[in-house]
Image: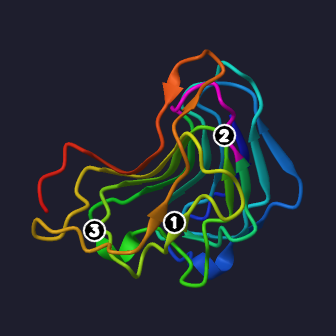
Amino acid sequence: SVGIYVDNNKASATIADATVNNTGTINLNSSNDIGIYAPNSTVANVGKIVSSATNLTSTVGVYGTNKTSIIATNGDIDLNKANQSQVAYYLKGDGTAANDPSFSSTSTIGKVSGHGVGVLIEDILIDNNKLMDLDYTASSTGNGIIGLVLKGNTFNAGNLDYTKDITVGNTEASNSGLKDYAVALYTYAQQGT
């Protein structure tokens, strides 16, 4: 299920036509739940999103696609400590740079706690204009967080054009006792330097 779903995909729609302000708490209670899904929209206030059950897999706090602009500064996403398959922010491109979702240029990562992936980027040629410094220790421990996961086509001519800082905490045991590693950058089937 989805906590907030915005359907702003009509032919003449622009991202100015839809703004999301989460002023409450979205509870992710089932595997594969999404907190906010807002294509072609501005997520101006992420608010609080909680992965509330201990056995969840594949939950996503905010899913951005088709020009979504995210201001994460006031976001508070709790991934829980069940495992590392929860994702705070998932940005997925469609191969057209003009349609890429991104974080607002003034945004910080806000608060991401628990264990899992902070930001997963798929099929977006990433650079310093699309993603800010990722400091998961500024408002939480950053323990058990994989700061940035890159999947699909994210390198520009074989080079990663993102050179900003990623700060995570320490490896920490999950609720099941397994180690959940703290890793700044994880690349999935990438080719480049």
> Looking at the image, which is closer to me, 176 or 66?
176
Report helix, strand or loop for mark 2. loop
In the picture, measured across the screen, residue 88 lies left or right of residue 27, that is left
Q: Is residue 80 magenta?
A: yes
Instruction: Check the image and report above or below for 64 versus 21.
Output: above
For marks 2 and 3, the one nearer the N-term is 2
Location of residue 182 in the rendering, given as x and y in whole percent from the top left corner: 48, 43
Q: Which mark is residue 114?
A: 2
- Do the residues under discs 3 and 1 have CB atoms within 8 angstroms? no
Name the main secondary structure of what is drawn in magenta. Answer: loop
Residue that extends furthest to the right in the rendered view of this protein: 24
The percent coordinates of residue 186 (x first, y second) are 33, 47
Residue occupying the point 81% across, 60% down: 22
Q: CA distance from mark 3 to mark 1?
A: 17 Å
Asked whether disc 2 touches disc 1, contact meaning CB atoms under 8 Å apart, the reply is no
Given the image, on which type of amino acid does mark 3 rest?
A: Leu
Q: Residue at x 71, y 50 (%)?
A: 77
Residue 3's quadrant in the figure?
top right
User: Gap in Å between the C-alphas at discs 2 and 3?
Assistant: 28 Å
Closer mark to the observer between disc 3 and disc 1:
1
- Comes first in the chain, label 2 or label 1: 2
Q: Nearer the viewer, residue 59 or 17?
A: 59
Q: Is residue 18 left or right of residue 120?
A: right
